[in-house]
Image (cartoon, rainbow, N blue to C red):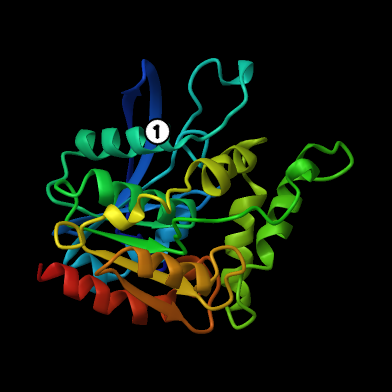
């Protein structure tokens, strides 16, 4: 018996385990569609729910197999055993190893990889080091050089709500034009983050991930690079995106008006109009 009032989405989720540096990570992933694999990486302190609009958009999924996964410590992916005995700190090396291990476990062939914020930073590293594996990389709010601009010590104060503080930190990075419902959905993901995870992610995002001294070595003929940044992003500003594009010869940079640091979740319809031609171009490579 069918219930006409029930609308099942096309997204399918499942778990898999990967081993990196002798640690076992239980990973949660969601996917939808067929065609060219498109791996999506979420922002610091959040999870793959940020890409639900792409996963549910048939215009994308008719050509692309959209795959989004939660990094360990994030969303539905567990931290490794013994996590309580040490401080979580995401390094460039660990981040890259997790991504490549996931891609190989999923057996994706010639995939595109798209990340936002810290995900946008790490895909630039992959464009340099894994140019033969990836068809192209898309850096959303991604730069090869960043600087910290707020104090993370607030996250450890006993008289404040860590999740609310995290959401407050990133709320200024959402454009004022973004729809209210999507704005608060984006912030809700931050309110649910595990203790210390946002801070641990920012170690990579603000410090360990800098590589402006090597980004010019990326060969965009081997691995095309696309950079998209919102005009209201005060973290990876348009200026930083443009400076990165100048160092990466052959990369293509676009500044998206009316959006901020989370284009795929804070204003999905606007984001669609800018990411669609990029994906169309990549599909013809």
As drawn, is 283 to the left or to the right of 234?
Answer: left
Count of numbered labels shown in the rendering = 1
As drawn, is 208 to the left or to the right of 6?
Answer: right
Query: Badge 1: how crowded within 10 Å, few (<14), some, or many (20+)?
Result: few
For the question of whether residue 208 can be seen, the reply is yes
Residue depicted at 36% across the width and 15% down the height: 22
Q: Position of residue 261 (x, y in %)?
A: 54, 66
Report the residue marked by disc 1: 93
Query: Relative to 106, is 188 above or below?
Result: below
Q: Position of residue 234 (x, y in %)?
A: 62, 68
For the question of whether residue 45 can be seen, the reply is no
Residue depicted at 62% across the width and 25% down the height: 87
Snapshot quadrant of residue 221: bottom left
In the image, farthest residue toward the right: 159
Snapshot quadrant of residue 193: top right
Quadrant containing the C terminus in the rendered view: bottom left
In the image, farthest residue toward the front: 213
As drawn, is 79 to the left or to the right of 34?
Answer: right
Quadrant containing the N terminus in the rendered view: bottom left
As drawn, is 268 to the left or to the right of 149?
Answer: left
Query: Relative to 18, is 139 above or below?
Result: below
Residue depicted at 53% across the width and 48% down the height: 205
Mark 1 falls on what kind of element? helix
Q: Position of residue 219 (x, y in %)?
A: 20, 57
Residue depicted at 52% across the width and 73% down the height: 239
Q: Position of residue 277 (x, y in %)?
A: 25, 79
161 or 233: which is nearer to us? 233
């Amino acid at each position: 018996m069918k219930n006409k009032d029930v609308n099942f989405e096309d997204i399918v989720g499942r778990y898999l385990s990967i081993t990196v540096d002798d640690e076992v990570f239980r990973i949660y992933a969601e996917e939808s569609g067929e065609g060219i694999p498109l791996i999506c990486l979420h922002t610091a302190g959040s999870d793959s729910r940020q890409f639900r609009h792409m996963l549910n958009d048939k215009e994308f999924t008719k050509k692309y197999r959209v795959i989004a996964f939660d990094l360990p410590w994030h969303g539905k992916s567990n931290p490794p055993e013994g996590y309580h005995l040490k401080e979580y700190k995401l390094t460039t090396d660990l981040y890259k190893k997790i991504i490549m291990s996931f891609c190989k476990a999923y057996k994706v062939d010639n995939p595109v990889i798209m990340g936002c914020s810290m995900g946008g930073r790490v895909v630039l590293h992959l464009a340099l080091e894994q140019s033969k594996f990836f068809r192209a990389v898309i850096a959303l709010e991604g730069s090869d050089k960043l600087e910290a601009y707020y104090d993370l010590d607030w996250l450890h104060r006993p008289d404040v709500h860590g999740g609310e503080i995290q959401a407050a930190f990133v709320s200024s990075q959402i454009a004022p034009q973004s729809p209210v419902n999507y704005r608060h959905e984006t912030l809700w993901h931050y309110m649910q983050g595990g203790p210390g995870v946002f801070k641990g992610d920012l170690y990579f995002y603000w410090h360990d991930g800098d590589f402006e001294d090597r980004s010019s070595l990326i060969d965009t003929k081997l691995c095309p690079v696309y950079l998209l940044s919102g005009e209201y992003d005060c973290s990876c500003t348009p200026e930083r995106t443009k400076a990165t594009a100048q160092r990466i010869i052959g990369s293509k940079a676009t500044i998206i008006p009316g959006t901020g640091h989370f284009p795929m979740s804070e204003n999905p319809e606007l984001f669609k109009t800018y990411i669609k031609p990029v994906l169309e171009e990549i599909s013809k490579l």
